[in-house]
Image (spheres, grey):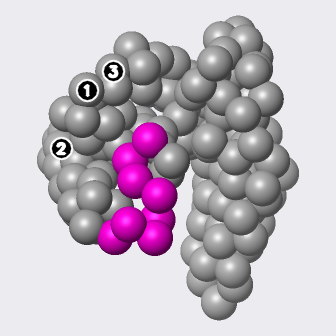
Amino acid sequence: MKELYGYWIGQFVGGIAAAFVLLLIVTQCGALGGVAETGLGCNGFGDASTTGITMMGAIVVEVILTCDFVLTILGVTADGKTGHFAGIVIGLTLTFVHIMGIPLTGTSVNPARSFGPALAMAVTGNTAALDQVWVFIFAPLVGAALAAVIFRAFKSFYSTEA
């Protein structure tokens, strides 16, 4: 538990740094269409979403997708016997999560992945993503917590020591 805060800080610093590197690349490469065209990978709902998903819809999508992703990670790493293919399962699940979520919200499932681009976009003068980023911090945390509760409730199914 004492390592948790260090991991969180590392995630957010990495997300912010990556977003500002992306901002630099986008502003230096005209072929990409600029910041307004790319959106820097920001998440959004309402007018900031390609589908116009509502705020509640975005919360539900992000909770479900994050729960699915975290539950998969917990499931394939629980007993330590799936090491040979755990990465493949986790990677395929993350791919599925993004295929499902990108058209709806841009897919967060990681608060740091959402905060960095929202902050970088705000520096350009567009604060829409930063105004909505709370959803993409709150919903993944709820989804991860829900996955932990579900996993703990059904842990006996994952355990080979029964």
Asked if residue 27 is positioned above or below residue 84 in the image, the reply reads above
Residue 102 located left or right of residue 21: right
Give percent across and percent down for residue 86.
Answer: 65, 76
Query: Dot 2: few (<14), some (14–19), or many (≥20) neighbours within 10 Å?
Result: few
Q: CA distance from mark 3 to mark 1?
A: 6 Å
Total tally of numbered discs in the picture: 3
Q: Which mark is residue 127?
A: 3
Q: Earlier in the sequence, mark 2 or mark 3?
A: 2
Q: Main secondary structure of the magenta part?
A: helix
Q: Amino acid at mark 1?
A: Gly
Q: Nearer the viewer, residue 152 or 40?
A: 40
Considering the numbered disc 3 on the image, is that residue within a helix, a strand or a loop? loop
Q: Which mark is residue 9?
A: 2
Which residue is pictured at 79% across the width and 29% down the height? 51
Considering the numbered disc 1 on the image, is that residue within a helix, a strand or a loop? loop
CB under 8 Å between discs 3 and 1: yes
Residue 115 located left or right of residue 5: right
Considering the numbered disc 2 on the image, is that residue within a helix, a strand or a loop? helix
Question: Bounds of the magenta span?
Answer: 29-36
Q: Nearer the viewer, mark 2 or mark 1?
A: 1
CB under 8 Å between discs 2 and 3: no
Which residue is pictured at 28% across the width and 59% down the height? 27
